[in-house]
Image (tube, grey):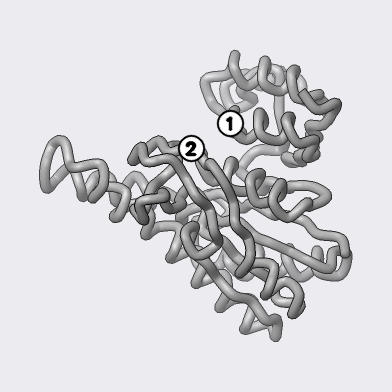
Amino acid sequence: MESIVLKFGGAALRDLAQFQKVAAIIIEKKTIYDRIVVVVSAMGTMTDELLAMAHQIMVDPPKREQDMLISVGERISMALLAMALFKEGYQAISFTGSQAGIITSTEHSDARVLEVKPKRILSHLERGEIVIVAGFQGVSFDGEITTLGRGGSDTTAVALAVALKAERVEFYKDVKGIFTKDPKKEPLAKHIAELDYEEALEVIGRSERKVIHPRAVELAAKNGVPLFLGDTVIRGCVI
């Protein structure tokens, strides 16, 4: 059975109207793929807003409590998207990172994915349900909620694709692909249609704006998972 992981960034989920548009994309993909896992970021600027609240309470909040706070954003997105799909007559279920079996290291605010145990995800995929997972977060072996740092939802998507042996990961962001330079600052920047993993890491490394997290590309490279970002595809030999 063919499977795919779809990742929607904060810009794609910036307001409630966008959830219906995202649901329509997922429904269209359901006509092609038997198994669909969706990874979501927090809505719009919600993570920044939550961090601002924390810093209004204290200048340097404890990292553990900060992770507890900012992990809420993705949980809001996953539940609202599940509701949007239910509204259209599709069975969907949402999972936090810990419920999805994403096991991480212990570093709060910059944890690394160590292992994915997708037992619950597989169970629901076998029933034909669409599974929605909160990106950016997981749980340590100590049972603590952790977050993966900025752009961590990209890594969540690739880690799940590896664990589920998905055919590809598709990223839906506010960019049309990867360019030689930031097209918002350089109108003449050239679009790059296809890169191998090493080329992608090089381009991303030179860019101030990380359109996809380097850790996600590195993980995809180790496991040969094709990545699609707008009109750009990243694939090649496993490195």
Helix, strand or loop at label 2? It is loop
In 3D space, how far apart are the residues under numbered discs 2 and 1 (Cα atoms)? 9 Å
Helix, strand or loop at label 1? It is helix
The disc placed on residue 187 is none
Q: Residue at x 76, y 39 (%)?
A: 227
**Residue for badge 1:** 215
Q: Amino acid at mark 1?
A: Arg
Tell me residue 17's x, y (percent).
55, 67
Q: Amino acid at mark 2?
A: Arg
The disc placed on residue 112 is 2
Image quarter where the C terminus lies is: top right
Give the image quarter of residue 147.
top left
Say if 189 sits above or below 220 in the image: above
Tell me residue 201's x, y (percent).
67, 21
Left or right of 175? Residue 191 is right
Left or right of 15? Residue 144 is left
* Towards the viewer: 75 or 105: 105
Cβ atoms under marks 2 and 1 closer than 8 Å: yes
Left or right of 128? Residue 117 is left
Tell me residue 148's x, y (percent).
45, 41
Say if 130 sits above or below 57 in the image: below
Q: Residue at x 68, y 73 (%)?
A: 123
Q: Residue at x 81, y 24 (%)?
A: 195
- Residue 194 in view in this figure: no
